[in-house]
Image: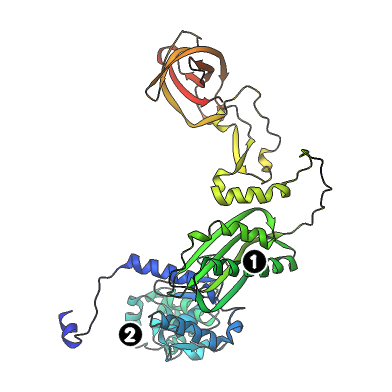
């Protein structure tokens, strides 16, 4: 460092921050979705799928130039490459003569011939071994590997990786792109001549995108199930909001209403220069027959789709875990007798036909039974008093016991004797005991209304 500063007094040095680099790369990956819906991260770069997107920017060369120019405006000395394989594009970006290098389809073998072996993403030890063997170009390695005997000898020394990397670069072996976010089913995009930041402008942009996206959904006979709004900021970061719907929908006004509740939390930073609205999940749309008007107060004809807007707004506001319904499951154990499913989701096949326990049950069941100190008459008497959460309760009335046996397939579970008890202040509790007479334990499991 001292020698470097002596040679370059204007040198700027800062501690290496791998975690910070990873966060920056993650943010840039989301920001880079303006050029491709499928973006994946490397250790030191990004992979973008150009299929179906490059022509929107005037071709592959213009697409590359736009990417390099945008990163340069952010202060990054970016290099980019495009090819018909991931390996060839990786090599072109790092070892090409220009900042943006395009390898025409089918030209990977000729284009990579003069690149060093490092262009094949080989480890440093393998590259050093190839250097000792006098192999300094990918073309030399290609010629060597084409001979079966030399290939076996090279594999004995370095393993199969050089041959496999070469085949991947030439497109002779598959190498899938695994994006950080799944490519959306559909996308609507809006670019701005000047960055926007006012909430009203963002809402107008959202309305425009929702109208465009819902029209595309309607043309494809699809309905939206999950949407994501991505706002690309001018500083290379992105803000995003995601939401789901209980049933397929394609009403732009309803979609805007769902997003509108969260728009105040969206930070535009120094300005937003592009907005993307993705249909991450889209299901087939089934036409529905409209109902005739129902008499006042008659809700018997309500269907799931009639409740979907309300369910979606509640889910969007409270969270998916807070808007559910309980479906019975074949179990007598209270905490396992029901399962939560999304409010409008169909009953799982494995739970159809399950019966609900008919005995009285408390309105509120605790997440886990809580131990209590109880004084009761043995052998079968209800508790006379008990202490729960440091408070003593005198029992004025009780009903029980109700015996609940454990499930034999879960092992040795003790039987429980439940009592519904009421204290002197009118509060009603659901308690139970388990164990033998010499070691009884009492628990409070629920609260009645």
- Residue 449: assigned label: none
Provide residue 75's location: percent of width, then percent of height: 37, 80
Provide residue 231's location: percent of width, then percent of height: 51, 69
Which residue is located at x 67 percent, y 46 percent? 344
Provide residue 323's location: percent of width, then percent of height: 59, 44
Which residue bears the numbered disc 1? 210
Left or right of residue 180, residue 287 in this image: right
Earlier along the polypeptide chain: callout 2 or callout 1?
2
Q: Quadrant of the C terminus?
A: top right
Which residue is located at x 33 percent, y 80 percent? 129
- Residue 148: tell me if it is visible: no
Look at the numbered disc 1 and give the secondary structure of its residue. Answer: helix
Which residue is located at x 60 percent, y 73 percent? 189
Identify whether 368 is placed above or below 379: below
Which residue bears the numbered disc 2? 131
Provide residue 183's location: percent of width, then percent of height: 58, 67
Kindly report the distance in space between the C-alpha atoms of the residues bearing marks 2 and 1. Answer: 57 Å
Identify whether 175 is placed above or below 260: below
């Amino acid at each position: 460092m001292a020698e470097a500063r002596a040679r370059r007094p204007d040198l700027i040095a800062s501690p290496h921050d791998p975690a910070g680099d990873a966060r920056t790369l993650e943010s840039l990956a989301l920001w880079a979705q303006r050029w491709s819906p499928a973006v994946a991260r490397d250790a030191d770069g990004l992979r973008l799928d150009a299929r179906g997107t490059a022509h929107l920017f005037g071709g592959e060369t213009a697409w590359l130039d736009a990417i390099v120019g945008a990163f340069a405006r952010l202060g990054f000395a970016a290099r980019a490459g495009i090819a018909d394989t991931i390996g060839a594009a990786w090599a072109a970006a790092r070892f090409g003569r220009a900042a943006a290098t395009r390898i025409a389809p089918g030209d990977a073998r000729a284009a990579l011939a003069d690149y060093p072996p490092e262009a094949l993403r080989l480890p440093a030890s393998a590259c050093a071994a190839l250097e000792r063997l006098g192999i300094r170009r990918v073309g030399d390695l290609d010629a060597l590997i084409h001979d079966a005997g030399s290939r076996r000898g090279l594999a004995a020394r370095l393993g199969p990786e050089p041959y496999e990397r070469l085949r991947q670069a030439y497109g002779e072996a598959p190498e899938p792109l695994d994006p950080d976010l799944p490519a959306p089913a559909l996308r609507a995009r809006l670019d701005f001549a000047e960055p926007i930041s006012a909430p009203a402008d963002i809402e107008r942009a959202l309305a425009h995108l929702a109208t465009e996206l819902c029209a595309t959904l309607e043309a494809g006979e699809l309905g939206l199930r999950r949407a994501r709004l991505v706002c690309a900021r001018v500083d290379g970061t992105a803000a995003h909001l995601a939401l789901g719907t209980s049933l397929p929908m394609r009403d732009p006004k309803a979609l805007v209403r769902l997003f509108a509740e969260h728009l105040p939390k969206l930070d535009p930073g120094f300005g937003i220069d592009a907005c993307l609205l993705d249909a991450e999940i889209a299901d087939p749309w089934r036409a529905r027959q409209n109902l005739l008007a129902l008499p006042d107060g008659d809700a018997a004809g309500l269907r799931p789709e009639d409740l979907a807007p309300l369910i979606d707004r509640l889910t969007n506001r409270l969270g998916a875990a807070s808007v559910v319904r309980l479906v019975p499951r074949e179990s007598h154990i209270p905490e396992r007798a029901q399962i939560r499913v999304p409010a409008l989701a169909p009953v799982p096949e494995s739970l159809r036909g399950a019966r609900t326990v008919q005995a009285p049950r408390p309105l509120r069941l605790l997440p886990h039974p809580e131990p209590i100190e109880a004084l009761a008459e043995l052998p079968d008497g209800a508790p006379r008093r008990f202490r729960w959460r440091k408070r003593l309760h005198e029992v004025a009335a009780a009903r029980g016991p109700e015996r609940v046996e454990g499930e034999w397939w879960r092992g040795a579970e003790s039987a429980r004797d439940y009592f519904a008890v009421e204290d002197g202040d009118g509060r009603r509790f659901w308690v139970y005991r388990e164990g033998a007479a010499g070691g009884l334990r009492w628990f409070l499991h629920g609260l009645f209304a």
